Amino acid sequence: MTETRRDQQKLWLILFQIKGVRARLNSLALQQSLFSTLAFLIGGAALIWGAALFLSPLLFLFAALAVAMFALAGIVRQGRRGLRQLANSDRAAAIADQRGDLKGRVATVLALAEAPKRSPLWPYLVEDAYSRREEFAPARIEPRWVSRSIFALLAAGLMALAIVFSGLRSGNQVRRTVAGSARGQITADIGNLEIRPADPALEPNAEIYADEKTLRKLEQRLAAAQRDADQNGLSRWMNKARNLAGDLQNELTGQKTENAGPPLQMRLTDRNPDQSDGSASNPSSQNSSGQNGSSASRANSGSGTAGDGQTEPAPPTTSMPGAEADQLARNKSAFPAQPGPDPADSAFQDFAGGGSGGGQGSSHGSGSDPNGLFGPDSSRTLGADNFKITIEAQASDESSRSGSPGYIPPRIRVPLNSDQYPDEPLERGSVPSADEAAIKRVFQR
Amino acid sequence: MNEAEEATLSEKPSIADFARIFRRVQGEVHKAIVGHEQAVEELLSALFAGGHVLIEGVPGTGKTTLVKTLGLALNLSFNRVQFTVDLMPADITGTRVILGGSEGRREFSFQPGPIFCHILLADEINRATPKTQSALLEAMAELQVTVGGTTYPLAPPYFVMATLNPIEMEGTYPLPEAQLDRFLFKVRLRYPGEDEMVRIVSSTTGPEEAGVETVFPLAEAASRVEALKRLVREVMVAPPVERYAARMVRATQPENSRILGDLHAPVHVDAVNRYVSFGSSPRGAQALIMGAKVRALLDGRANIDYEDVDRVAAASLEHRIMLNYAAHTDNVDAAHIVEQVVKAVRTSRQ
């Protein structure tokens, strides 16, 4: 009787120890699920916030979607993994057997503990398992109290801290720059600006001053640009996407509620009031202007929006005092060469007023615009240009009899004489300023 | 060991007794048999598990010597039947003969054949006709022999060891699957290595014979072996291990087997689907568990583990798997199939 009770106590101890193993295994499985989920949440949120801070609206949208999907997949995967790792008593006993090299002793004790009829070897099995209880102690089967996935959580937290820190630092720099630039007044010529519908995601943060004529011209160009944008379905969708992304960005970064600083002061001038009026009323010429204007926009790309939120006049790269700009605007014939920041924009550099001529579509060598006649010397090497002419003609049979081969003219190459030159564009030369008016009159005829 | 201890051991041996006796018998056998450690262990495992053994080996590898030595060591009655093509069933089971009585009456009397013993060596069993081969079926499965409408029980323990010569196939009758299935294990005696060959020569050509000693006294031998067999059956098996053995046997059946019907095996083995025409019968699972129990006792355990099942898989399943023509052309044997099955089932467990 005493033996039986002692065996029963040993059995209880074994079963209790299996419960301990199970509790520890399940604790680790839950910890892993929890820590991994938190790591994905924190890491994903930090990445999305960082993307909202540093990326443009569309890029942010794609990046945020990718990060959100990755994080969601990770959370689901880790959740399922955690559920799979949850151990019942049988599984805990099997793990104890495996890790303690107990060759099925614990699992057999657990499986047959409730059996109605026990083998005569049952006491031996219980005693055997009990004598090896140290080998399947919970601390030995699973020494860890905390899951290794806490390192993932820590890494995600550190990454989030780094992103927040750099985001705050970057935000302060932007605010300082905006505040610094807002202290002065930026002056730009309307001809140098590409006018296009404003990014709906961007909040208006500029004030534009101009005379009545210039403002009217601005309005006309705005309307033309809006018409162009409305005709393109893709751009409408892009605008919607930008709008959504911008709203999200603003929500995430708190820019809506945050004081973005004093608005940008911009004085708008117009150096060619006559030509620009005509261009604004002609949509086709507006398109042509857009091509040149896009060059100008690359040169003058930057932030800043019109007051109505529909136009984004890119501020010029040069800022000058207002009085000097006014003087420059009055002097129609004296166009200073714009120091365009983009060296690739040769058209803009060659013809500083080319894109600003109210959308006349002037281009290199066209000669139709007298304003585009003068510019800096070109260093083009002669003989570098060529052209092709396509001739549409029907073949004719010039033979006297039908069926005989047609006449094929022989190929003759006649060398140029000493007074002849190949048909190549002339090199642009410098024009004395005194002769400019005369040359211009000739071309205007 | 005093008489009381001997008596206790005879009635109810412990796990330690089992391992000790097993190792002692093993040692006595190895006095006459050089090498073949695994084969001897499998042979003894089958004996204590209550099964029969099919021994396959080329001539001269010690098949007959092994069986004879085992009979000597266990001190059990031992008979040998050399199977030939003209051997009749009555030559094995025995027959009724007319004997004259004391009062002048003549009566039929049953003369037991060589099958009536504890250990029977059926040498080159595949040389006898199927009719004669099947004379062993009833004895192996039910420990009884029926002759002339009368059933005669066989005295336990009863252990049949049949030998097969795998190279001389001319004039032989391959054992039917039903008969093969009756053998718990198939033991292969491999061709000895050079060192083993030297030991064989030196131990068998000298003036001294191998002095094999009996492990049990003659009067107690049968009861002692039976007690050890009962102990084997008492070893405990956890349900997951039983399921593991069942899954292993199911995995030997190809997926398109007509026998399985809609019941598809949970583990799919490519080699089985390609090379096996019919897999193991349920007796294969019994053999796995019984063999694993012996292994557990030898390891001093009262329970079996997955590893024990893996260790006896080859001996238990190889002869139960019928290979198809593709296996013969690709030179794939049953050992390779069983190896793949064990690997697949082990993976499915983890």
Image: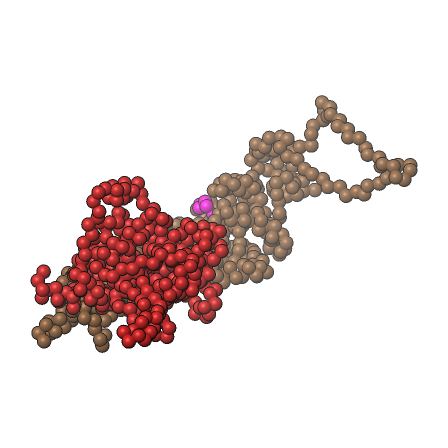
Chain colours: A brown, B red
Residue at image position (61%, 50%) is: A288
Range of residues picked out in magenta: A315-320
Between B78 and A122, which is closer to the camera in this rendering?
A: B78
Screen quadrant of the N terminus of chain B: bottom left
Residue at image position (66%, 43%) is: A368
User: Is B178 colored magenta in this rendering?
Assistant: no
Q: Position of residue A52 (x, y in %)?
A: 39, 57
Q: Is residue A382 left or right of residue A196?
A: right
Q: Is residue B302 visible?
A: no
Seen in the picture, residue B275 relative to A396 is either above or below; the reply is: below
Q: Is residue B341 left or right of residue A284?
A: left
Residue B281 found in image quarter: bottom left
Between A304 and A27, which is closer to the camera in this rendering?
A: A27
Q: Position of residue A17 (x, y in %)?
A: 17, 66
Between B127 and A45, which is closer to the camera in this rendering?
A: B127
Seen in the picture, residue B279 relative to A407 is either above or below; the reply is: below
